[in-house]
Amino acid sequence: MDKLVIYGPTRLKGEVTISGAKNAAVAILPATLLVNGISIIENIPNISDVKLSCTILEKLGAKVNWIANNKVEIDTRNITSSNTPLDITSKFRASYYLVGSLLGRCGSAEVGLPGGCNLGARPIDQHIKGFESLGAKVEVSQGKITAKAKKLVGTSIYMDIVSVGATINVMLASVLAEGTTTIDNAAKEPHIVDVANFLNTMGADIRGAGTDVIKINGVKELKGNYTYSVVPDQIEAGTFMLAAIASRGDIVIKNCIPEHLDCITAKIFEIGGNVEDLGDSIHVWTNKRPGRAIVKTLPYPGFPTDMQPQIGVALSIADGTSIINESIWESRFQYTAELNKMGAHITAQGKSAVFEGVKNLTGAPVYATDLRAGAALIIAGIIANGETHLYNLDHIDRGYENIEDKFRSLGAKIQRVSE
Ligand code: EPZ
């Protein structure tokens, strides 16, 4: 089992280039099943969730050819199955996109229930509501989702809750349906826009992605044979923004889209940091202790839940007492127990946590409890006095490409060692 050994404190300084967005890539890969042709995808992050998605595509009959480290060619002209085994799909959350894309392509899907970060209950009722509204019969039993439809017919669907996954999954199921589908109360995250842009590049007719009403006019076929570049990862960029603030450093974050980061920028100004929009990069710096804040996580364009642990680290050493309200997930404060091992004073209760800022953290052995918690604990190890050993790196490797190399290039004293 590998671990990261981190010595602190270090003030991070320099430039870092952001990879393609994990949450766009893990939806675009299954979306290639809707294409009766070849899809070439660039700027795809080299992370384990992407590799797993490609393995599943190959098991379904697709040909996957890595042209370069972050560029892959996927030939989905010959799909031989619509069944995916539970042992793979249960390893990550995005496997549920296979239902929407196989339903759209073949009219049937049998997919093991998804796994993913342990953030509490992660229901899929809105996905099922969408598929059934389009005319599919859906059953969840024996650990898998089975969906069948003689014909998918476009309709209007009102999401009871703003859901990234359900919005994308209904979009996937409706691009080849007969007629028009309208998704009301749709999620608006940048990765949703990216999936819609990919599908439109391949011949779909989707309008309104990024707003809360998305219209999909069904088309006969997606021909493909185009190249698509995945959007830069909003959450990875945000992770390095908060690393600059927590470490009192100075970082230029390259290959990002600053307007996707507006909510994070606003919070950084609020706690006394500096941010400068450089067009396709963003400059973040401070030389003082962060101030306190009240943070509420919300669907985009609100403060992202996937940035909650990272800002939690900055607030754990802030000058004053802060509160975080986590409105999306039931159980996303597990990381606070790990920060308390490092000397933080955090009290988490249900969907809220109170952070009494301390002057410094001290290094300790800590465990990543999920993907973003893992990234946050790297930042904690970098700013702490002394040595931190961080375990459970599988969580981090699911969603961050070469994370320790990127932090090391900013001056962090960090090594991956095998236990
Ligand atoms: C996506 O998860 C992301 N994962 C998550 O990122 C992210 O935290 C989340 O969106 C919110 O932004 C991927 O894109 C692979 P949701 P998803 O459906 O789609 C409830 C990371 O760190 N809900 O938007 O599963 C749900 O319980 C990961 O990259 C229903 O009630 O999230 C939650 O409270 C962690 N019924 C809320 O909606 C449903 O059918 C938002 O969930 C679906 C969701």
Image (tube, grey):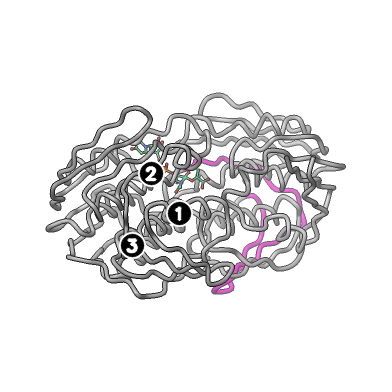
The residue at 23%/59% (across/down) is 175
Label at residue 84: 2
Distance (Cα) linking label 3 and label 2: 24 Å
Left or right of 339, for residue 142: left
Q: Position of residue 105 (x, y in %)?
A: 25, 56
Alpha-carbon neighbours of circle 2 within 10 Å: few (<14), some, or many (≥20)?
many
- Foreground mark, 3 or 1, reads 1
Three-letter residue code for mark 2: Thr
Between 104 and 267, the residue placed more toward the observer is 104
Q: Position of residue 301 (x, y in %)?
A: 43, 53
Q: Is residue 316 placed above or below 134 in the rendered structure?
A: above
Three-letter residue code for mark 1: Val
Q: Is residue 301 placed above or below 363 in the rendered structure?
A: below
Residue occupying the far right of the picture: 386
Disc 1 C-beta below 8 A from ligand 1: yes
Q: Is residue 419 placed above or below 345 in the rendered structure?
A: below
The residue at 46%/63% (across/down) is 64
Instruction: Say whether marks 3 and 2 touch (CB < 8 Å).
Output: no
- Quadrant of ligand 1 in image: top left
Distance (Cα) linking label 2 and label 1: 15 Å
Q: Which residue is identified by label 1?
A: 26
Mark 3 secondary-structure assignment: helix
Instruction: Say whether marks 3 and 1 touch (CB < 8 Å).
Output: no
The residue at 68%/55% (across/down) is 403
Q: Which residue is identified by label 3?
A: 196
Q: Position of residue 314 (x, y in %)?
A: 68, 45
Residue occupying the far top of the picture: 349
Answer with mark 3 or mark 1, whichever residue precedes in sequence: 1
- Foreground mark, 2 or 1, reads 2
Left or right of 387, for residue 152: left
Alpha-carbon neighbours of circle 1 within 10 Å: few (<14), some, or many (≥20)?
many
Which residues make up the magenta segment? Answer: 271-297
